[in-house]
Amino acid sequence: MSHLDYVVAMGEADLRSRMAVRIPVQDIIVHQDFSVMRTIVHDIALVLLAFPVNYSVNIQPVCIPEKSFLVKAGTLCWVTGWGKIVEQGSSSKVLREVALNIIRHEKCNQILKDIQGKVFAVVQEGGVCGYNEKGGDACQGDSGGPMVCEFNNTWVQVGIVSWGLGCGRFGYPGVYTEVSYYRDWIVKELSRASCWIPSIFLVLSVCLVLHLGTLVTL
């Protein structure tokens, strides 16, 4: 499947409503060092849309953090998606959300290494983790989705759903790409694209920028 087969849908919380704004994908820029050899690293991409999108009540931008920004351990953040409701279960037709507390990659790496019995790092710099003691979690079908945190009444995307061991298992944090770590890469690719297609809007492949008021609690 080529990038020309993809379409980005924006502004829809219920997949049955068919009210989304749909934009063809012109190109996809995958991080040059993306790898799934021993563990998933540099799990981030940008999507080049075929034409710009107007903001609306249900389509809003999300802020990208500065490179120096490191979300603190314990911070409460939110993950959204239409993935499986439970491990090995069915996917949701309605956009759902779950609150997770941040775990920095050093501690998360040790937790998952102990669980898996690995000697090499499974969560490296550029990753961050989230955990909910009540079992809330992202699941299959949520990959690429946004983890956002609210700071001073502004929503900031601090993470991208990357991978995990099952869904919602006790003591198993989920792993996310840490957006601030890739700030320079994002800016570089945006600048490069704007040189030859100045009128086209580039968005994070994982940013379905939906109005948070329309979401359903997981």
Image (cartoon, rainbow, N blue to C red):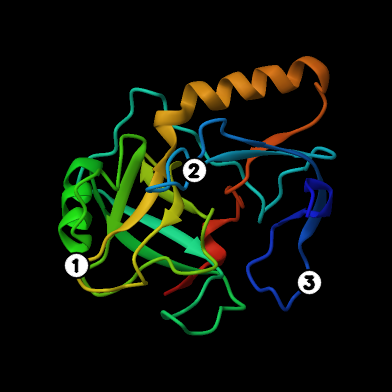
Q: Is residue 3 above or below residue 65?
A: below
* Residue 42 appearing in the image: yes
Q: CA distance from mark 1 to mark 2?
A: 23 Å
User: In the rendered picture of this protein, how many numbered marks are placed on residues?
Assistant: 3
Sort mark 3 into few (<14), some (14-19) or many (20+) by Cα contacts within 10 Å: few
User: Which percent across, then down, holds residue 27?
Assistant: 77, 38
Position of 195 with respect to 33 (left or right) is: right
Of labels 3 and 2, earlier in sequence is 3
- The residue at the point 42 percent across, 75 percent down is 218
Which residue does the numbered mark 2 point to in the structure image? 43
Residue at the extreme top? 195
User: Which percent across, then down, holds residue 213?
Assistant: 53, 62
Q: Amino acid type of disc 2?
A: Asp
Between 68 and 143, the one lying in front of the other is 143
Tag 1–tag 2 contact (CB < 8 Å) = no
User: Which percent across, then down, holds residue 180?
Assistant: 41, 31
Numbered disc 2: secondary structure: loop
Which residue does the numbered mark 1 point to in the structure image? 171
* Residue 74 appearing in the image: no
Q: Amino acid type of disc 3?
A: Arg
Residue 18 tag number? 3
Q: CA distance from mark 3 to mark 2?
A: 29 Å
Numbered disc 3: secondary structure: loop
- The residue at the point 21 percent across, 73 percent down is 170
Residue at the extreme bottom? 89
Q: Amino acid type of disc 1?
A: Gly
Residue 9 tag number? none
Of labels 1 and 2, earlier in sequence is 2
